[in-house]
């Protein structure tokens, strides 16, 4: 994944933070890789551009993993955080579900 997206990883979970400049194909590949490793994947996006890139990447990841028997679905929710100035901001969280 390039410098326009960050990834936090635990033992069995991955949280990917997306920016508007994140390439959808790179993000989709990273999501697919994490799904193949049986990780719990969440993708977070703040802003219209980041949400757009995330949606494209989720479709790409779904295509990358379909031939391997994975059927990806997504649960979307909002999250709230404080920015560096202490201002409250909202973003979207996309939980990847492998059914």
Image (cartoon, rainbow, N blue to C red):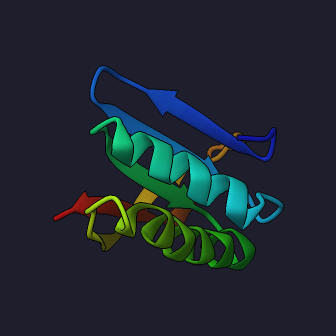
Which residue is more in the foreground, 21 or 58?
58
Going 62% across and 64% down the picture, which residue do you hit? 46
Examine the rendered structure and indicate whether residue 36 appears above or below residue 32.
Answer: above
Examine the rendered structure and indicate whether residue 52 appears above or below residue 23.
Answer: below
Residue 49, percent across and down?
74, 75
Picture mark count: 0
Residue 36, percent across and down?
36, 43
Which residue is more in the foreground, 1 or 76?
1
Residue 66, percent across and down?
37, 69
Given the current orientation, which residue lies at the most extreme top position? 11
Examine the rendered structure and indicate whether residue 53 appears above or below residue 35.
Answer: below
Going 36% across and 23% down the picture, which residue do you hit? 10
Quadrant where the image shows the N terminus: top right
Which residue is more in the foreground, 20 or 84?
20
Quadrant where the image shows the C terminus: bottom left
Q: Is residue 40 visible?
A: yes
Examine the rendered structure and indicate whether residue 26 appears above or below residue 39.
Answer: below
**In screen coordinates, is 18 left or right of 60?**
right
**In screen coordinates, is 41 left or right of 81?**
left
**In screen coordinates, is 20 left or right of 76?**
right
Given the current orientation, which residue lies at the most extreme front position? 67
Going 83% across and 61% down the picture, which residue do you hit? 21
Q: Is residue 78 visible?
A: no
């Amino acid at each position: 994944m390039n410098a326009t997206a960050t990834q936090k990883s635990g033992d069995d979970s991955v949280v990917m933070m997306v920016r508007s400049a994140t390439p959808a194909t790179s993000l989709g590949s990273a999501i697919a890789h994490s799904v193949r490793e049986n990780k719990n994947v969440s993708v977070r996006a703040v802003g219209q551009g980041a949400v757009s890139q995330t949606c494209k990447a989720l479709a790409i990841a779904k295509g990358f993993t379909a031939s391997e028997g994975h059927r990806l679905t997504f649960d979307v929710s909002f999250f709230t955080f404080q920015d560096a100035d202490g201002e409250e901001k909202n973003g979207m969280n996309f939980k990847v579900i492998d059914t």
